Image (tube, rainbow, N blue to C red):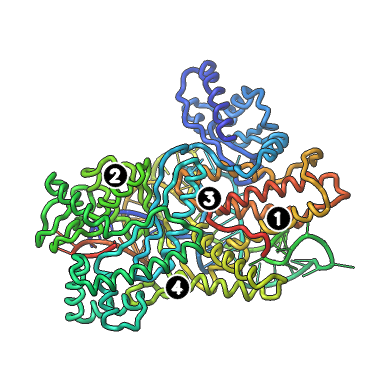
Amino acid sequence: MKQEIKKIIEKVLIELQKDLGDFKIPEILVEIPKSLEHGDYSTNISMILAKELRKNPNEIANLIKEKIINFKEISKIEVIGGFINFYISDKYIVENIKKINKDFGKNNNLKNKKVILDYTDPNPFKEFHIGHLMSNAIGESLSRLFEFQGAKVKRVCYQGDVGIHVAKAIWGKLNNKKLKWPQAYAFGAQNFEESEKAKNEITDLNKIIYEKSDKKINKLYDQGKKESLKYFDNIYKKLGTKFDWLIFEGQTGPLGKKIAEQAFKNEVLEKGEGGAIIFKGEKYGLHTRVFINSMGIPTYEAKDFGLAKIKYQKFAYDKSIVITGNEINEYFKVMLKAMEQILPDLAKKTFHIGHGMLRLPEGKMSSRTGKVITGESLINQLQEMVLEKIKDRKLSQKDKKIISEKVAISAIKYSVLKQSAGSDIIYDFNKSVSFNGDSGPYLQYSFTRALSVLEKSKSKKIKASFKNIPEKIGQLEKMMIQFPEVVERSAIEYQPHYVATYLTQLASCFNSFYAQEQIVNKEDKFSPYKIAVTQAFVNIMQNGLWLLGISTLKKM
RNA sequence: GCCCUCGUAGUUCAAUGGAUAGAAUAGGAUCCUUCUAAGAUCUAGAUGUUGGUUCGAUUCCAACCGAGGGCACCA
């Protein structure tokens, strides 16, 4: 609808150019006003033109208004305070609600474009903590947004299976066999800092692991990696993510080193202190980073070159999106600047999204000290809270278990996705994940309620129909047809929270509707229409929640 | 010290340069013999400070104050 209004105004302005003399046509902005009193769509075009035309905005607005004829979808055009407000006709709204089906909200903006997303990225041997849950929630939602735009999407999880953290974990295991891997890591990391002897041992161990020169260590390594991946896989299943590829630093390292060495020959990278190969970012207002350290081991920086190349070999992408915590925003700029010069084609296609950090009221979490809330324990604790809440419901134990898990995941995902992706989340266990109000469970609950209304309509044998339509079309209907525009904006800006906030508003509208109207009622001639509206709401919620990676439930 | 983010109700978050700054929670008052009360309806409460650009600034610019992150061999 926005596009239609834009086009019409554009036409009118071209006509006005003849009448009023030549003027530049600015970009036309059509928005949905915050207040209902200002129509369904609104534009400020006359205010922008006011200065150039030296006329009162209202005067210009009226000129534009008079020239708009034969606009069937609009029932009323109003000029107030320089704005031109458009009211959509009820007929148009109903026509569009009729069209709402399982594909509602999809478009072809990225048809056949190849997009690869890289997210979650936990490290084997270490804990899967709540920061990884954030990355996963955002990455999965973005993946689905791209799929909704018609893109071919591949999901990648990039994991550090080499590097000093592995040496720390293996050292921890060697010195205390009873420890589980994440604890062994914490133990090793602590000793690395506190003991000079341990530090040296771990550094040597790192080289042994990298070179694969010790059979016993190799075996321990394989075992640890396998256990970690199994543990992660279990969590991905709960979260509803299925990765197409797992890529490891063990693979990106050698290739990355080669590319970095080539870059050194091409004088993109240079030699720094101790013989390390570095990139001087200062030339570009950035800082210096090491690509190959003085021991000849490629760092994360060089590995990222290899990663980009490996991804491209697997899937010749048009866009590659990397989702990580925002603590590496600066790092990524440096790496990308270097990449622009050595792999320019790939650099152009690479985008980084730094999400905020999950912070506790007490301070920052650290897996190094073992002070973390693990992803698993968070899910479990929330699940317990849900189970307590539904203990008296007439549901089987099995159903209760499934419901509580899906509700717990939705609470976490929603609390991540409801706010813009860049900013931190203050995670207060007692407060912030609530099951009512502005929350994932609220959305699930609204959906389930609507579903049970549809069930009732079936049992009462009333079918959805648009035969009798009430005189006044409600806010719910108007909001429903905005869904495709919200999805589009979310995808363009890489911000799932537009979908999240929209769904909450929509659900709130539906809940009001539900409270005020009796939907299924044989005496009411509008009942079939209300059922049709409910069906449309169910379709939108189904798609919207899918975009957020949140499961819908038949009962809860 | 330099660079990057960010300061909005008590709290947690919204608001493509637009109209009366929205929600949710916590507080106060209502509504279950009726489609799931994880709900609905009222009520009260906020743009860090000072300037600038603009017809119009929470949004853009500058300074200050405050918070977080990053600045060479970790990721």
Q: Is residue A297 left or right of residue A129?
A: left
Chain holding disc 4: A
Residue at the spot of label 2: A347
For marks 1 and 4 on the same chain, the one whose residue lies earlier in the sequence: 4
Separation of residues labelled 2 and 1 (CA atoms): 47 Å
Residue drawn at x 46%, y 19% as measured from the top left: A22
Is A220 drawn above or below residue A236 in the view shown? below
Q: Of the residues shown, which amino acid type is indicated by label 3?
A: Tyr
Chain holding disc 1: A
Q: Of the residues shown, which amino acid type is indicated by label 1?
A: Leu
Is A327 drawn above or below residue A110 in the view shown? below
Task: Identify which residue, A379 or A82, lies in the foreground.
Answer: A379
Q: Of the residues shown, which amino acid type is indicated by label 2?
A: Ala
The answer to whether mark 1 and mark 4 are in CB contact below 8 A is no
Residue A210 position within the rendered picture, expressed as x and y whole percent measured from the top left: 21, 65
Task: Identify which residue, A240 or A97, lies in the foreground.
Answer: A240
Mark closer to the observer (2, 1): 1
Q: Are marks 2 and 1 on the same chain?
A: yes
For marks 3 and 1 on the same chain, the one whose residue lies earlier in the sequence: 1
Residue at the spot of label 3: A498
Mark closer to the observer (1, 4): 1
Q: Is residue A530 left or right of residue A553?
A: right
Chain holding disc 2: A
Residue at the spot of label 4: A361
Q: Classify residue A278 by image quadrant.
A: bottom left
Separation of residues labelled 3 and 4 (CA atoms): 26 Å
Residue A166 position within the rendered picture, expressed as x and y whole percent measured from the top left: 28, 70
Residue drawn at x 61%, y 51% as measured from the top left: A542
Q: Residues within 10 Å of mark 1 (few under 14, many from 20)?
A: some
Q: Residues within 10 Å of mark 2 (few under 14, many from 20)?
A: many
Residue A536 position within the rendered picture, expressed as x and y whole percent measured from the top left: 68, 46
Residue at the spot of label 1: A451
